[in-house]
Amino acid sequence: MENSEKTEVVLLACGSFNPITNMHLRLFELAKDYMNETGKYRVIKGIISPVGDAYKKKGLISAHHRVIMAELATKNSEWVEVDTWESLQKEWVETVKVLRHHQEKLEAGSCDHQQDSPTPGRPGQKRKWVEQRQDFSQKKLLEPKPKVVPEVKLLCGADLLESFAVPNLWKSEDITQIVGDYGLICITRAGNDAQKFIYESDALWKHRNNIHLVNEWITNDISSTKIRRALRRGQSIRYLVPDLVQEYIEKHDLYSYESEEKNVGVILAPLQRKVADANP
C-alpha cells in the first residue's frame, strides 16, 4: 500500500512521567513499529502529555520539572515531542478531553491549509473576477486532493487498560469515547492478560477492533515508581532514564522520602470529581 493510501496516526501518551524513563520512550518505538508494519497506518508523530499538578497523585512532583525532564528525554528524537497544554491546566483534565484537544488541533491545522476562492469586487471588475475564477479552477484541478486529517490514538501500557476496571476512576462514557472514537495502542508486559481483560469488558469488546495490542518481546520492567524508590535509597538509576534526565534529577535533588509524601491523604482528582458529581 502506498503511503498516500495509509492512515496517518499521531500517538498520544498521557501520564505522570514522574519521572520519564527509557521505558516510556520505548513504548513509542514499539507502537510505531507495530502500526507501520500493519501496512494500514503510518505514524507521523508522537506526543508526550504530562498530567497537571491538580491530578493530586501521591508523590507527584511539580509539572514544571516533569515537563522539563520529558523535553530533555526527547531532545534528540526526530518524531516524539512534549506538549504542555494538559500540564498547564489549573484543574485536572480527563484523558478523553486531551485526545479531543489534539484531534481538534490537527483538524484546525488542516483547515488553515485550505485555499479560499476569490471573491468578486465591484461590478466593473466582473471580467477580472471571472478570469480569476477560471485561473483558480485550473489550479484546483492540478492541486492534490485535500489532505486527510491524521488520527490521534492513545498510547498506553497494560496497566492503564486494566485501570478501566477500577471503580469510579473512569467514566464509562469516557472509556467508550476513547476506544470508540480514537482507539488504543496498548503495549503489553509479561504477566498481563490484556486480551482476557478486553473479553471481560463489554465496552472494550464492542470496540476491540480499535484496540491494538502490541507484545513487548524484549521485556523491560522499568517503572517510574521503581526509579523513585531507587533515588530515595541513594541507588544508581543510570541506564534506566536518559542521561540528561538523570543529571537534571541530581542537580535539583527531585526525589526523596519527603517528595514521596506529597499529596498523601489527598483524594485523587478523578475520585474527587466523582464524589462532587454524586453530591451536587
Image (cartoon, rainbow, N blue to C red):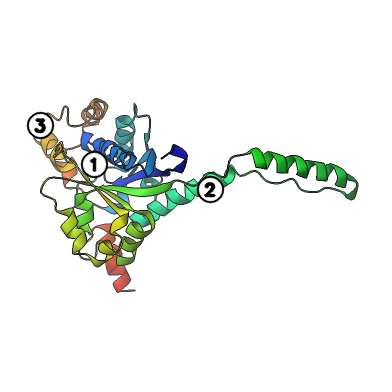
Element on which disc 1 rests: loop
Residue 198 location (% of width, % of height): 21, 59
Q: CA distance from mark 1 to mark 3?
A: 17 Å
| Three-letter amino acid code of the residue under disc 2 | Ala
Name the image quarter holding the C terminus.
bottom left
| Three-letter amino acid code of the residue under disc 3 | Gly
Quadrant of residue 67 within the rendered picture: top left
Nearest-to-viewer mark from 3 and 2: 2
Residue occupying the point 24% across, 67% down: 202
63 left or right of 106 in image: left
**Which one is earlier in the sequence, the residue at label 1 or at label 3?**
1
Quadrant of residue 231 within the rendered picture: top left
Reading the image, the residue beneath label 2 is 108
- Please tell me which residue lies in front, 97 or 115: 115
| Three-letter amino acid code of the residue under disc 1 | Asn
Residue 93 makes an appearance in the image? no
Please tell me how crowded label 1 is: few (under 14), some (14-19), or many (20+) other residues with Cα within 10 Å. Answer: many
Q: CA distance from mark 2 to mark 1?
A: 31 Å
Element on which disc 2 rests: helix
Reading the image, the residue beneath label 3 is 234
Residue occupying the point 35% across, 60% down: 180
Reading the image, the residue beneath label 1 is 18
